[in-house]
Image: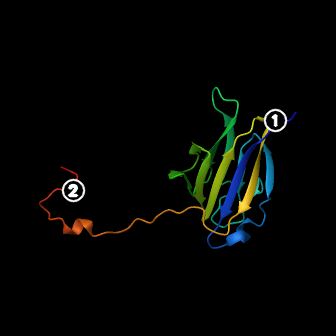
Amino acid sequence: MEKPLTVLRVSLYHPTLGPSAFANVPPRLQHDTSPLLLGRGQDAHLQLQLPRLSRRHLSLEPYLEKGSALLAFCLKALSRKGCVWVNGLTLRYLEQVPLSTVNRVSFSGIQMLVRVEEGTSLEAFVCYFHVSPSPLIYRPEAEETDEWEGISQGQPPPGSG
């Protein structure tokens, strides 16, 4: 009896190019336990043709945690020029972070939401891709206030004393 595969449900969004940015993305991609490469290069498993994207921009890498029988995943930044934003952390070249059950990823204008559903197979995993018509990540912009302008120079800032 085959063991169920771990599933990565990946939603993709690009604010200006829309669905055309993901024209070459298959709806389903089964992969062995080697790193899954994303980029614009010929060796990328998931190829996206975007000008700011590196040939090998990032990888999703399965691994086993000590004492676990289930695949876990990390995301590694492979671009020397760009960076990747994952769950509030900025990754630079060769930096990686473990993925949780739901992950928000942003790079080269792309927004990606990755949901990990555990399976028991250690031989492969499967990705299901969905192109979203609307933004996946909402990062509130910092608001400028004039709060500090009303404080006289001689008084310490609130909460500092």
Horizontal side of 2 relative to 109 (left or right) equals: right
Q: Position of residue 40 (x, y in %)?
A: 72, 60
The numbered disc on residue 41 is: none
42 or 142: nearer the viewer: 142
* Sequence-earlier tag: 1 or 2: 1
Q: Position of residue 96 (x, y in %)?
A: 58, 44
User: Where is 43 relative to 144, above or below?
Assistant: above
Instruction: Please tell me which residue is depicted at 76% across the width and 54% down the height of the picture.
Output: 128
Q: Quadrant of residue 46?
A: bottom right
Q: Is residue 156 visible?
A: yes
**Mark 2 residue type:** Pro
Q: Which residue is mark 2?
A: 158
Q: Position of residue 2 (x, y in %)?
A: 85, 35
Q: Which residue is mark 1?
A: 3
Horizontal side of 146 relative to 34 (left or right) equals: left
Q: Quadrant of residue 25?
A: bottom right
Instruction: Please tell me which residue is depicted at 71% across the width and 48% down the height of the picture.
Output: 8
**Mark 1 residue type:** Lys
User: Where is 128 relative to 144, above or below?
Assistant: above
User: Where is 149 relative to 11, above or below?
Assistant: below
For the residues labelled 1 and 2, the Cα–Cα distance comes to 58 Å
Q: Residues within 10 Å of mark 1 (few under 14, many from 20)?
A: few
Q: Residues within 10 Å of mark 2 (few under 14, many from 20)?
A: few
Instruction: Please tell me which residue is depicted at 23% across the width and 52% down the height of the picture.
Output: 159
- The N terminus lies in quadrant: top right
Q: Quadrant of residue 53?
A: bottom right
33 or 127: nearer the viewer: 127
Instruction: Please tell me which residue is depicted at 67% across the width and 69% down the height of the picture.
Output: 133
Q: Is residue 55 visible?
A: no
